[in-house]
Image (tube, rainbow, N blue to C red):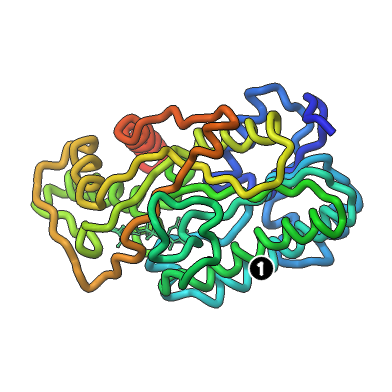
Amino acid sequence: MDLTPDSKIYIAGHRGLVGSAIVKRLAKSGYCNLLTRAHSELDLTDPLAVLDFFEKERPDYVFLAAARVGGIHANNIYPADFIRDNLFIELSIIDAACRAGTKRLLFLGSSCIYPKMAPQPLKEEYLMTGPLEPTNSAYALAKIAGIEMCRAYNRQYGMQYLPVMPTNLYGPGDNFDLETSHVLPALIRKFHEAKSDGKKTVTIWGTGTPKREFLHVDDLADACVYLMEHYDGTELINIGSGTDVTIRELAEMVGRVVGFEGELVFDSNKPDGTPRKLLDVSRLNAIGWRAKTGLEEGIRKTYQWYLKQSLGE
Ligand code: GFB
């Protein structure tokens, strides 16, 4: 079944960082039959409510972008919330989609679910070949279960559910809460507030030595739609920019974009997490897709969005 302009496409998690970017990208391509439900209208952790929704709506395609997500600190202190909610969400949606006859579903994993010390860059076949990073093992196992559910439903029921593995994402619609967010939005806010308050230092968690790869969420959305339009396989596919930076280099870049001129202070009481998780994107490149947004340009665009959204400037 091919994606056509009037295909009924359900985007689960349409208000989040990824879901909102996918809705924008689909609308830009003229897909005019997009289905969404707010959290208040449909609790995705309730399997019966989700099954009832799917049996009524019967979407042709599903982008499963709904999840409970957070940075290293949130994962470290709320592991039960992360494993419970993510298992409920993916179990409810994948099973209901199959019962309602949805042939094509795209499921989002995350690069942090690869083994902590796997060789770099990370190839898709390294999944489940070693111990996980302890700070987010609960979330990781939930996401690994989602990938295995796609594979199991494809094998047993002949579905075409595609799991993808995005790297660290950022962009408009991100979470800027300093306790629960990922590093990039946290640094944008920290540097902005330090500059506005005339502070001399900004505190960076950990040692600054871990390396992270970043992909602007609009590129991720473009890759997800590209895959649904041009790829009919179901093998796990990494989606990344192919380059990484140290946390110190990232902090210096964000400081430059924001215009902060003070010093960086590193708080080694905070965890570093995985030392590196650079994705091997050769499988995706071979299918014909490459990331377009450079990191400094992406940070600049996100900071502009942050100023407009959060400060009304
Ligand atoms: O982005 P982040 O929270 O998650 O942290 P992960 C990345 C690195 O940035 C860690 C450091 O080494 C943090 O210690 N860091 C420095 C900071 N300053 C800050 C700060 O102010 N806030 C934050 N949050 N980090 C996550 C997983 O790992 O990757 C999630 O825990 C998710 O499950 C996500 O999959 C993509 O990249 O380490």
- Tell me the amino acid under the disc marked 1: Leu
Ligand 1 visible in quadrant: bottom left
**Quadrant of residue 41 in the image?**
bottom right
Secondary element type, mark 1? helix
Judged left or right of residue 167, residue 192 is left
* Residue 108 image position (x, y, % from top left): 60, 51
Q: Depth check: give the residue in front, 32 or 236.
A: 236
**Residue drawn where x is 65% and y is 35% of the image:** 227
Question: Which residue is tagged 1?
Answer: 87
**Residue drawn where x is 56% and y is 73% of the image:** 81
**Quadrant of residue 4 in the image?**
top right
* Residue 30 image position (x, y, % from top left): 71, 22
**Residue drawn where x is 66% and y is 23% of the image:** 29
* Structural crowding at the residue carrying mark 1, measured as other residues with C-alpha within 10 Å and reported as few (<14), some (14–19) or many (≥20): many
Q: Is residue 247 visible?
A: yes
How many numbered callouts?
A: 1
Residue labelled 1 has its Cβ within 8 Å of some atom of ligand 1: no
Judged left or right of residue 270, residue 218 is right
**Residue drawn where x is 88% and y is 46% of the image:** 58
Of the 4 image quadrants, the one containing the C terminus is top left
Q: Is residue 65 visible?
A: no
Vertical comparison of 138 with 97: above or below:
below
* Residue 84 image position (x, y, % from top left): 62, 73
Of the 4 image quadrants, the one containing the N terminus is top right
Q: Depth check: give the residue in front, 281 or 119.
A: 119
* Residue 26 image position (x, y, % from top left): 66, 30
Judged left or right of residue 161, residue 99 is right
